[in-house]
Image (tube, helix red, strand yellow):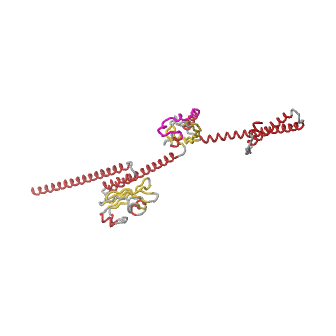
Amino acid sequence: MKSINNTDKQIIELQELRRQIEELKKSEAEHKKTEDELSERVRQAALSAEVGAALVENKDLRSLLQPCAGSIVKHLDAAFARIWILNEKDNVLELQASAGMYTHIDGPHGRVPVGKFKIGLIAQEKKPHLTNAVLNDPRISDPEWAKREGMVAFAGHPLIVADKLVGVVAMFSKKPLNETALTSLAAIADEIALGIERKKSEEALMQSTRHLKIIIDTAPQCLKLVASDGMLLEINPAGLSMIEADSLAQVEGKSIYSLIVPEYREVFREHIANTYKGMAGTLEFKITGLKGTPRWLSMHSVPFRDAKGEITALMGITEDITEHRKLREQLFQAQKMEAIGQLAAGIAHDFNNILTAIIGYGHILHMKMASDDPLKINIEQILESADRAASLTQNLLTFSMKQIINLKPADLNEIIRK
């Protein structure tokens, strides 16, 4: 009986030992799983951090994406990884980055039409394509290559921002991809998509800024920004030439009132004040350039607003109207001369009528006088003076009617004698 009890006790102890061993194994497995999960999280965090750091660098788009492809290879055990960007104009995916086994970006996969091959289909469908059985995947166009290189898994993700396709990221691996790796790739795809769109927006903005600067710098009119106190904030090359400045530094931050002649400074202040109240307007004023040249200018002004809609400056488009003013003054002078000519014509007509009577009566009186009459010489002088007056009225009529004067030789001796 005692022997049976010892056997039972040994059996119980053996069972307890087995139970403890199983619990230890289970604990070790859970610990291993925890370590693996922690390792995956660390790797995922490192991948995200490296990609995020690469995407904020001040580089061109291709230089930003190459480190991203390298990080995918490094942290997801990829054989190689590639990133394509959509060329919307041609509807083609253009390879911008490649890391791992293949680093070239030209060749047959350099330009992939949307809807063609596995990469083009991912772009067209806007859905990821994942497989751990590459050799049996109908989308793999070259299974012989995959077998030769030992490829096991493929993962490709569309790069999408607000339902807009911007590209595709894809990787091949010689090991099966677990759920964590696939999740990491999906998260990285979102980061890369946002990075591409942000960089494209920055480049588009820079391009627009460059174009705008070219337009402003080559504009024949003076374009300037003026603060409420008359301080010159910005001015283009045409404006610098207009005020006879050699560079922007010569006038930037200085008051524009020093250039305006004194009698126009007050009206210029009122013009600025009205612009800051939201009113557009045009003003003609006179300036003296930095080198002393006087000029007449015509400035059309509008409020310049910031992103919040607040008026921060006067934006003026200014033209040099000095020659226009001269032509206008010449026109006024011509109009005055025309008025004088019309007046002269009226006077000449009336005066000619009076002379006609004087000459007529003078000839009648001359004919009735005796040849030896001593007063006859006086009548002849009256008639001669009347003829000269008639000639003068004829010249006035010619001038007033804008007729061509018939020039002919004159005997100066005879003119002086008379």
**Residue 106 in the image, given as x and y percentages of width and height:** 38, 60
Q: Is residue 152 left or right of residue 166?
A: left
Q: Residue at x 47, y 38 (%)?
A: 249
The spot of residue 214 in percent (x, y) is 49, 47
Residue 405 in sight from this viewpoint: no
Residue 53 visible, this angle = yes
Q: Quadrant of the N terminus?
A: bottom left
x%, y% of residue 197? 42, 52
Against 360, residue 205 (above or below) is: below
Q: What's the residue at 71%, 41% (across, down)?
A: 338
- Quick check: is 247 in the magenta stretch? yes
Q: Quadrant of residue 383?
A: top right
Q: Front-most of 400 and 409?
A: 409
Of residues 138 and 350, the one nearer the viewer is: 350
Span shown in magenta: 242-265
Q: Residue at x 30, y 57 (%)?
A: 77
Up the image or down, 213 lies above or below 256; here it is below
Name the image quarter holding the C terminus: top right
Q: Point out the residue furthest to the bottom here.
A: 144
